Image (spheres, coloured by chain):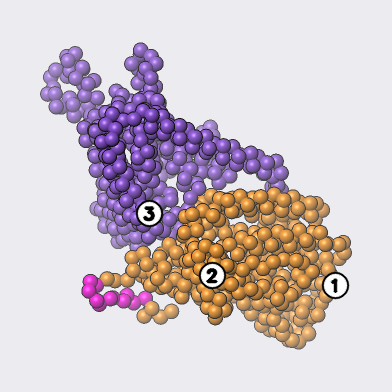
Chain colours: A purple, B orange
Amino acid sequence: MQGYLDSLIAAGWFSALPVQVVYAGGMLLAGAVVLFVFILLVAGFTTFVERRIWARIHSRVGPNRVGPQGVLQWLADGLKLFMKEDLIPAAADRKLFRMAPYVVLMGFVATFAVIPFSSRLVIAEMDIGLLFVLTVTSLVVVGILMAGWASNNKWSLIGGIRGAAQIVSYEIPAGLSILPVVLLAGTLNMQELIRQQGWAPWDWTLFANPFAFVAFFLFFTAALAEGNRTPFDLPEAETELVAGFVTEYSGVRYLMFFLVEWGNLYVIGALVTTMFLGGWNIPPVTDSVFLQTLLEFLTFFFKAYFWVFVAIWIRGTLPRVRVDQLMSVCWKYLVPIAFVNAIATALWIIAFPHGNRVVAFVMTGIGAALVALFFSRVAFHLRRSRVRARNQFTLSPFA
Amino acid sequence: MGLQEYDIEVERDGLDTEEMTLNMGPQHPSTHGVLRFVVKADGEVMRKATPDVGYLHRSIEKIAEKVGYHGFMPYTDRVDYVAAMFCNQSWAMACERLAAIEVPVRGEYCRVVAAELNRISSHLLSAASMTLDIGAATPFFHAFREREKINDLLEELCGARLTYNYMRIGGVAWDLPPGFVEQTRAFLDDFEPALAEFHDLISGNKIYVERIAGVAPTSAARAVAYNLVGPNLRASGVDFDVRRDIPYSIYPQLKFAVPVGRGEVGTIGDCFDRYIVRMREIEQSVSLVRQCLEQMEPGPVLAKVPRKFRPPVGEVYVRVESARGDMGWYVVSDGSEFPVRCKIRTGSFAAMSMIEELSRGLMLADLVAVIASLDIVAPEVDR
């Protein structure tokens, strides 16, 4: 980003303005573009994708009326929520109640400042990138607690407190499982993390050594918990707490909470892709900067979006854990494993200061074998369900 | 319930903490209709959950005294609308026993086919809503997909999908429609693998088992003391089934096992046992329906019963193994066209009274699992 602005200034643009103003303006413009063109679109579209995938898992059809195959459903939902009356309960703390969605939204949107889109597209290439993400996502806790408290509703309060306890707890295994990656790369800079990996799977941090492999699963689990996703969706457990901390919200404020929830899925995917899966790395296939950037963007986007799909899939499969089980999973299992993992990574670095290609190839092989095993299971189940589909029994005239 | 019940207790040792009084229901997503619990909670842990019944009271027993014996049949559907066939059957049986009417054999077979199909659908609903309450939405939809087919079948049979009004005093309203036997067999062939798939999906799921194994166990003695019936009683290890032990209809001619809770993954009588006993009863019901379809022979389905039905003076108590257990109907006749008194004894009411004891010291999320595992259906509690 800074590079573009520097070249523009050198070319004699904005000569009347101080450099700092140009930088600030450029950042704001890029932020606005990312927010309105990318985040809104991705978060909104993800709600549609989630509903359709979920419906297929449930053996339903899902929304298919608005636009071709229902692709505009998310717009219709958003519009409806915009036009709804924005209720604030009489006994609520009005100021906090209004602030909470903005705080949550802020914590979420700020992460996009450092999340890269391609080798050239990133709002701010900060040296503290990963640390920044961990920090701003903590803001979400404050917003959730605020929403729970300000609603003056006991279900909201329980939801808010559950959310706070959960997110604060799971930040520890998340942080600890980032450590191996940081140790291996020696940097917190998101772009640098990606640059150190290659396009091929055996160059990814995921397969660099066994500990990074473990760290990946630890991080993904902890990130699901931080994003309040099933099986850790306790703060808004609809069958226990009505709707948790969003019980009293309606209209646009409700929309903001949901934007964050679905947008967060992409953030989880983007972080995983950045740290473990080689980010936007592709072999140089074309001389055109534009085309290369586009390909890198698509690579990164689809890698990240795959994990959105996995999260949706998990939501379609697993029930919800109980609050004490949630805590024991975190403190009795994830935290110790992450600790041992981080120390073991340090020892690994002492043993192999320049990495070990053989281990990387072996790990990649194991990964490929796991994927193959998985797909053979999927094929088995598909075959079985096709057998079922043949003698499907129905009396319904609509079937 | 007096006002003093709602008072907040304050612990005086050390830091003062207040108990939170939570109102769970009547508009709460997992109270299965309009139930209400006054929950006293210390954070996530419940001190106790007091059930508050009566939101769905419709004076069904009083209506029986006003509409006459034939006219009351559609009202029985509303006693337990999830398993209406059993209410139909028990009302018909009570009237038949009062007037000593013999039901044609084919009529009895039709009743059992309808009732067992209804038991499958009721247990599917119970298991489905239980998984949903634990937080898994997919098994819920899969179970409802199968239940929908049973609704289709019963619609073929009697024109209604929920409140069937299928049975009559002296038999059933209609014989099986043409093609029903083949359709039912086709459904059962399709349903058995679907049930296996349901077990694959959720019954062995680690999170699901952890959530319900060992939660709120009822010992056999407590279950009997609280008058639990049906699957709830059997889950506690008490081997009692009205169909086998106080036989009625054609059940003595059918072979079926009575699944009993064994505490496979936790304690005997915990939420998992109540769940798995229901799932096994579904398998038994499938076999019962198959046997009935095999054994059925052509014949009349409805005995001759006068339109002005005046049973002789007397009283009768019939028991039927409903989907929610031993359902008892006490009917007193004074020889007129209207019963003098009708009292219905249902399983959910007894189960409801046990929740206060079961809920002590559990987590808030467990209460939802306990309500679901006891299979409480609100209309049956209040009538």
Along the line of sight, the residue nearer the viewer: B195 or A254: B195
The residue beneath circle 2 is: B269
**Closer to the eye: label 1 or 2:** 2
Image position of A366 with respect to B4: above or below: above
Q: Chain of mark 2?
A: B
Q: Magenta span: helix, strand or loop, mainly?
A: loop
Image position of B281 with respect to B356: above or below: above
Q: Are marks 1 and 2 on the same chain?
A: yes
Q: Which residues are magenta?
A: B6-16
Look at the image and say whether residue B127 sits in the magenta stretch. Answer: no
Residue pushed farthest right? Answer: B299
Can residue B56 be seen at all in this image of the molecule?
Answer: no
Q: How many marks?
A: 3
Place residue B14 in its image quadrant. bottom left
Describe the element under mark 1 as helix, strand or loop.
loop
The residue at the point 32 percent across, 75 percent down is B8
In the rendered image, residue B25, in percent from the top left (x then y), is placed at: 45, 65
The residue beneath circle 3 is: A329
Q: Are marks 3 and 2 on the same chain?
A: no
